[in-house]
Amino acid sequence: MGSDEKSNYFGRDLEAMSFAINYHNWIISEFKQYFGETIAEVGAGTGNFTQLLIAANHNIRSLVAFEPSANMYPLLEERLSATKQVKTVNGFFGAKESKEQEQFDSILYINVLEHIENDAKEMFHAYNSLKTGGYVLIFVPALRYLYSEFDKQLGHYRRYHKKQLIDLVESVGFRVVKAKYFDLVGIIPWYIAFVLLKRSMSSGNVLLYDKLVVPVMQHVEKVLTPFVGKNLLLVGRKG
């Protein structure tokens, strides 16, 4: 994700996370009020999250889904071809063939920013591509001590701490509206499975966690904001 050339990305995490319907809808619920009518989704993968996003938001007038991976893009294009308000782009957001200036109400980075080597440059382009009053919506893996061999295999350059992510978006001009940790309980299984035991993600484990744990934790974290979590979400506003 660090260059403007098309790439191959086999996305084992995306394949496993395609079963995490409750988890994805939880993320959508946190961002829903900021979407607006025109959206860019950066790193849309095979479109699992995109479909849920469209289903949950009937006010979306247009959504441009960017996916640079040469092997994943055909799946994205096929899946979304019948959705009239969606345009798919096989390229990097910010590449010469896909540059957009002040067009979007919101730009989404859902488990994507950690794949981008120069995240400051990416945020600068996002800022310039938003309308005044638009929002950048970011969801990333958190906590450096959770960085594992699995992260490395997936092409993650980093896991973020809250201040680090806030400083990043503020450095290009965004005003932070919301920044908080997400999925407190997920820290322990992630640390054991991926840091200590050096395993890979499986769809079975994801499905079990999604059905049994996520609905409970969504309710808990709606009432009590966690002081730390496996992930981070941030909303930044332009202007």
Image (cartoon, helix red, strand yellow):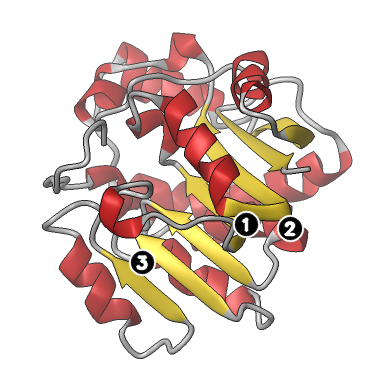
* In the rendered image, the vertical position of residue 135 relative to residue 48, given as above or below: above
Q: Work out whether mark 1 precedes mark 3 in sequence or the reverse, and give the earlier one.
A: 3
Along the line of sight, the residue nearer the viewer: 27 or 214: 27
Q: Quadrant of the N terminus?
A: top left
Label 1, on which residue?
106
Looking at the image, which is closer to me, 62 or 219? 62
CA gap between label 1 and label 3 equals 18 Å
Are the residues tagged 3 and 2 within 8 Å (C-beta)?
no
Residue 200's x, y, as percent? 24, 33
Which residue type carries mark 2? Tyr
Q: Position of residue 102 (x, y in %)?
A: 59, 56
- Taking the spot 70% from the left edge, 43% from the top edge, the residue there is 217
**Where is residue 184 shown, x and y percent of the image?**
65, 29
Instruction: Please name the amino acid that badge 3 sits on.
Output: Gly
Q: Whole-Å distance between the Cαs marked 1 and 2?
A: 7 Å
Left/right placement of residue 57 relative to residue 154 reads right
- Residue 97 drawn at (x, y percent): 27, 57
On residue 34, the disc is 2
Kindly indicate whether the residue at mark 2 contacts the one at mark 1 (C-beta within 8 angstroms).
yes
**Residue 102 against residue 139 in the figure, above or below:** below
Number of other residues with Cα within 10 Å of mark 2, as a class: few under 14, some 14 to 19, many 20 or more? some
Residue shown at 63% from the left, 26% from the top: 229
Residue at the disc numbered 3: 47
Residue type at tag 1? Ser
Give the residue at the far top of this rendering. 145
Question: Marks 1 and 2: which is nearer the front?
Answer: 1
- Residue at (25%, 29%) from the top-left corner? 155
Q: Give the farthest residue toward the right.
A: 223
Q: Is residue 203 visible?
A: no
- The residue located at (72%, 31%) in the rendering is 180
Observer able to see residue 190: yes
Sequence-first disc among 3 and 2: 2
